[in-house]
């Protein structure tokens, strides 16, 4: 309390002095740091459906590979005389042009392991005349005809033998046998006749053959095997005579 006096020292009034209030200002909040701006997630590209045919065509067009070189020597199953899937002989291989005899062997080997009656409709000219058996001459002669060896298909061994002889095929020793020659039994008795195609020869009398061979009393299968005996017929181009040198 504060007393106030006038000039005559009288108490004039009294006043209570109140200390000024201290106003405390609230602290100014510090601004919160802004979170770092995250990079926008990359949008996953929408995959368009792949046109496999177009991709394949583009690869083929851009490829510099000689497709002819890749398929050289392969035999395609194509239609012959309106029969789809009938196989003809190859004319070349990865070794280059093959001999007529080797072409016959390559063709015959395409049917290795098949039952003989199942070859009908696959090998040109082959008729499976014997049904499940007796197809040896049918198979060998059909292979020879399809590989342009000048022989016509026949279901009979003795008729095949006669054709070979008439066309200039002659007996060949096992040491001189070549792929594509024809092997036969010497017997011409019915029931004992058989024929196969020579596939390999070592030049020393050993050779292998392929044909329609018995696997039971009522079934034949095409397969290759070692062979001995019998007779081999082969065609050899006539050799031009060597001119005799004239004396000087």
Image (spheres, grey):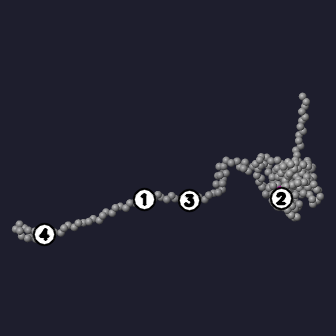
The quarter in which the C terminus is drawn is top right
Image quadrant where residue 128 sits? bottom right
Q: Which residue is mark 1?
A: 36
Residue 165 or residue 88, whichever sits in front: 165
Q: Real-space Cα distance between discs 1 and 2?
A: 80 Å
Q: Is residue 248 above or below residue 57?
A: above
Residue 59 or residue 106, whichever sits in front: 106
The answer to whether marks 1 and 4 mark residues whose Cβ atoms lie closer than 8 Å is: no
SS at mark 1?
loop
Q: Is residue 246 visible?
A: yes
Q: Real-space Cα distance between discs 1 and 3?
A: 29 Å
Q: Position of residue 7 (x, y in %)?
A: 5, 66
Closer to the camera: disc 1 or disc 3?
Answer: 1
SS at mark 2?
strand
Q: Which residues are magenta?
A: 220-224
Q: Residue at 89% of width from left, 51% of height from top?
A: 232
Q: Real-space Cα distance between discs 1 and 4?
A: 62 Å
């Amino acid at each position: 309390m504060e007393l106030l006096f006038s000039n005559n020292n009288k108490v004039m009034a009294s006043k209570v002095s109140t200390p000024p209030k201290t106003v405390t200002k609230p602290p100014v909040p510090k601004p919160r740091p802004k979170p770092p701006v995250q990079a926008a997630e990359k949008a996953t590209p929408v995959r368009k459906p792949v046109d496999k045919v177009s991709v394949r065509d583009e690869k083929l067009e851009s490829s510099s590979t000689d497709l002819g070189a890749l398929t050289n020597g392969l035999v395609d199953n194509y239609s012959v005389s309106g029969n789809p899937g009938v196989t003809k002989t190859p004319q070349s291989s990865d070794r280059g042009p093959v001999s007529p005899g080797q072409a016959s062997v390559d063709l015959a080997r395409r049917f290795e392991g098949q039952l003989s009656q199942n070859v009908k409709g696959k090998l040109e000219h082959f008729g499976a005349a014997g049904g499940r058996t007796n197809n040896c001459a049918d198979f060998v002669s059909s292979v020879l005809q399809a590989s342009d060896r000048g022989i016509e298909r026949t279901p009979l061994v003795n008729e095949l033998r006669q054709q070979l002889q008439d066309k200039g095929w002659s007996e060949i020793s096992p040491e001189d046998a070549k792929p594509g020659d024809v092997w036969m039994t010497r017997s011409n008795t019915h029931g004992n006749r058989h024929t196969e195609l020579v596939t390999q020869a070592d030049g020393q009398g050993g050779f292998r053959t392929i044909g329609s061979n018995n696997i039971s009393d009522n079934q034949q299968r095409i397969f290759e095997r070692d062979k001995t005996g019998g007779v081999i017929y082969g065609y050899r181009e006539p050799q031009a005579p060597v001119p005799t040198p004239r004396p000087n």
